[in-house]
Image (tube, grey):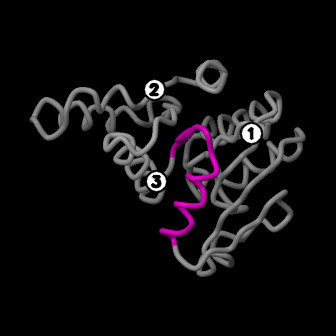
Amino acid sequence: MPPKSVCVYCGSRPGVDPAYTADADGIGKALAANGWRLVYGAGDVGLMGTVARAAQDAGADTFGVIPQHLVDWEVGKTDLTTYIVTETMHERKKVMFMNCDAVVVLPGGAGSLDELFEALTWRQLGLHEKPILLLNTNGYWDPLIKLMNHVVTQGFADASLLDYITVVPDTVAATAALRVALS
């Protein structure tokens, strides 16, 4: 049986809070410690690079997917266990998602939100049952959580939408939730 794989969506920048980088490092190490493969966007910058280097340094397999137009911009990390270059962003997201058993979303920008909402929408439509964890480092995702509750209270989504995301405060809680979800 192949090892379980965790797709990590996160920023291609480090952000302003050093805790974001610390959590990215912690997730990378936790993946390796549990024998899980990292699936991610193949960048070598920002939180993406931090997660990948931590996972690699701790012995995890790494599976990176990057579209050709971002190879230079995000500095494609070519020393991964598996490195795939796609033609489009859409293809990148599909390959990443199809090669994972769970998703963890760290702080990030528009790209991370896009990836999160695509996975969430697919879950809402019954296209998968993969766990989706939102790592809420120092409350980073609090405004998003508030917005999602607003979407539900205003009648644009069923309350079950909120059940498809597990919000965790730190890497210890994320690792524990993944152990349960992937067992």
Residue type, mark 3 in image: Glu
Residue 171 visible (yes or no): no
The front one of 111 and 156 is: 156
**Could you tell me which quadrant the N terminus lies in?**
top right
Q: Nearer the viewer, mark 1 or mark 3?
A: 3
Mark 2 and mark 3: Cα distance apart in space: 16 Å
Residue type, mark 2 in image: Val
Residue underneath mark 2:
167
| Vertical relation: 39 (above or below) 35 | below
Sequence-wise first label, 2 or 3: 3
Residue 57 lies in the magenta-colored region: no
The range drawn in magenta is 89-107
Q: Do callouts 2 and 1 mark residues in contact (Cβ within 8 Å)?
A: no
**Residue 152 placement: quadrant:** top left
Residue, x 10% and y 35% (percent of image)?
A: 155
In what element is the residue under mark 1?
helix
Residue 82 picture location, percent across and down? 80, 60
Residue underneath mark 3:
115
Residue, x 27% and y 27% (percent of image)?
A: 160
Residue 170 picture location, percent across and down? 59, 25
Residue 16 picture location, percent across and down? 55, 47
Residue, x 51% and y 70% (percent of image)?
A: 89
